[in-house]
Image: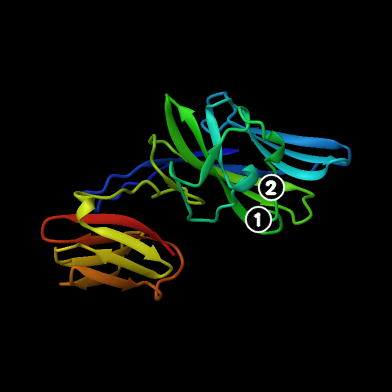
Amino acid sequence: MRYLMIICIVLWLPDVSVAQIVYVDLDPDVRLAASHMSAMDYFLDMDNDGVDEFWFMHFNVTPPGVSCDVFTAQDGDAEMLVRSMYRPLAIQKFDTVQSTSEQWVCTVSGSNNWAQSLDDEWCGKGDRYLGVRFYRDDEWHYGWVRIEAEADRSAMTLKDYAWESTAGRSILAGVASTTGIIASSQPDEISISQSGHSVSINAGNQVLRHVAVYDMLGSMRLEHDACAGHFVLDLSGLPRGLYLLRAETGSSSRTTRIAL
């Protein structure tokens, strides 16, 4: 297992604050594939403090059959994202994990421990991500775990994970760096929303003097000057990846991340 602290410092955007992401590559991958009438499990200590937050188990028992299960290992100090019937929510790369994400649950304190099984949204779908959060120094920290579950549930593989070292700050699933970039000064004056490859920028009564898109190496990929108060940016010409969008008026600016 390799532990790597990745710190991204963006020097070319002076009013943007940057978070620190702790990324761990499980090398080799942790593959849980229990033989018949047995089980295999793996306990995950997200922040390497000697206390496990999550518990992964592969059952191969009849009944109830073969299943890939996920549990929280602490009562009240760790939670995972779930959907209806408390099934773990299968999120995709670049999805945001944050306090307002769907529904959080702790299986230790609930009565639905039996329901924490990876279902058809996971099995046979390739890499999917489990949104997680855990308590550290009396505050929530958000993270993700990358999992691949076989279509027939014959095995589940844990590949890597990451968590945001800044309490309360969101993280993008599958991203090990640059995740913590937050809005710059006076963000309420400029609103930015994304739908696919289209990004809508609204400055209200202000004039958008400059809009620019940068890649993660700091190179400008697109820019527009002297825009109106509302502008729709077409990013369909850019390859898949993470970008920074910076919008400026005469009195404020906002920088946000864009995932394509």
In which quadrant is the C terminus drawn?
A: bottom left
Local crowd size for mark 2, using a 10 Å CA cut-off: few (<14), some (14–19), many (≥20): many
Can the viewer see residue 23 in this picture? no
In the rendered image, the vertical position of residue 189 relative to residue 103, given as above or below:
below
The residue drawn where x is 51% and y is 31% is 47
The residue drawn where x is 47% and y is 46% is 101
Q: Are marks 2 and 1 in contact (CB under 8 Å)?
A: yes
Q: Which residue is mark 1?
A: 121
Residue 141: percent from left, percent from top: 45, 35
Image-based side of 245 in relation to 77, left or right? left
Q: Secondary structure at mark 1?
A: loop
Looking at this view, is 74 or 172 the one in front?
A: 74
- Looking at the rendered structure, the kind of residue marked 2 is Leu
In the rendered image, the vertical position of residue 47 relative to residue 246, given as above or below:
above
Mark sitting on residue 118: 2
Q: Residue furthest bottom?
A: 237
Can the viewer see residue 69 in this picture? yes
Residue 210 placement: quadrant:
bottom left
Q: CA distance from mark 2 to mark 1?
A: 7 Å
Residue 40 placement: quadrant:
top right
In the rendered image, the vertical position of residue 120 relative to residue 198, given as above or below:
above
Residue 201: percent from left, percent from top: 27, 65
Residue 128: percent from left, percent from top: 60, 53
Residue 217 placement: quadrant:
bottom left
Local crowd size for mark 1, using a 10 Å CA cut-off: few (<14), some (14–19), many (≥20): some
Residue 207: percent from left, percent from top: 14, 66
The residue drawn where x is 62% and y is 30% is 110
Looking at this view, is 6 or 36 the one in front?
A: 36
The residue drawn where x is 44% and y is 70% is 239
Q: Secondary structure at mark 2?
A: loop
